[in-house]
Image (cartoon, grey):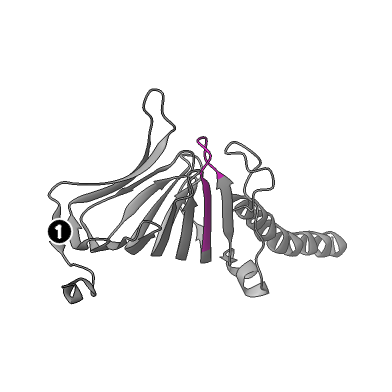
Amino acid sequence: MAAYDNTHSRVVAWLKVVLPLVALAILSTLFLVSQRHEPTGSLPYTTARNSEALREQSMIGPNYAGVTTDGAAISLDAESARPGTGSTVVAQGLTGAIRTPDGGTLDLVAASADVDTAARSAELTGGVKIETSTGFTLDTKALTASLSETSVVTEGAVEGHGPMGRMSAGKMELRRETAEGQAPAYVLLFTDGVKLVYQPPANQGDRP
């Protein structure tokens, strides 16, 4: 009987170590560095960089890279991530970038994000900074970005600077538009009460 009890105890002790590691391995599939750049490709993959993260079933420095169905490249990097509810991963200290096929860029920085791998979307919260290759530097409280198609929509008001001066709007959206006989265009739309305070270039006042 003593031998049986010892064997049972050893099995239980091993399971306490192995099962959390298996759970972490499953969690690690929620972020990836895409090798084939296919929006419906392999499951996400990442690695945790220290043993403390293993014990806490969290990840340090996870990243995601993929391509949308319309050809835009998306990358997400976080300081840390942990499982959320359902198919959601909760990330902290997120930076992201969207590179559209026409050469445009949109960079994002957020305090936190909920990445839903089933819905293929990321909800950035806690204050989000937006910078675009067209000269906009904007702030908003939260936004939702699709990981399957080029679509970024703020959850509320946005304000900051643009090429013509300081501006604010009730909503901002990045989306792909197509017109018959023309190449697809990626446009930044401001709606719901747009305000612009025009600021001329600094050297304009020097002209005769």
Q: Is residue 36 above or below residue 114?
A: above
Which secondary structure lies at badge 1?
Answer: strand
Please tell me whether residue 1 belongs to the stretch shown in magenta: no
Q: In terms of image quadrants, where is residue 3?
A: bottom right
Q: Name the one closer to the observer, 85 or 118.
A: 118
Q: Name the one closer to the observer, 34 or 112.
A: 34
Q: Position of residue 77 (x, y in %)?
A: 53, 62
- Which quadrant is the N terminus positioned in? bottom right
Q: Tell which residue pokes out farthest to the top in this image.
A: 180
Can I make out residue 90 in this image? Answer: no
Q: In terms of image quadrants, where is residue 204?
A: bottom left
According to the picture, the residue beneath numbered tag 1 turns out to be: 196
Q: Name the one closer to the observer, 18 or 198.
A: 198
| Mark 1 nearby-residue class (10 Å; few <14, some 14–19, many ≥20) | some
Q: In terms of image quadrants, where is residue 38?
A: top right
Q: Name the one closer to the observer, 84 or 146.
A: 146
Q: Position of residue 62 (x, y in %)?
A: 58, 62
Left or right of residue 203: residue 113 = right
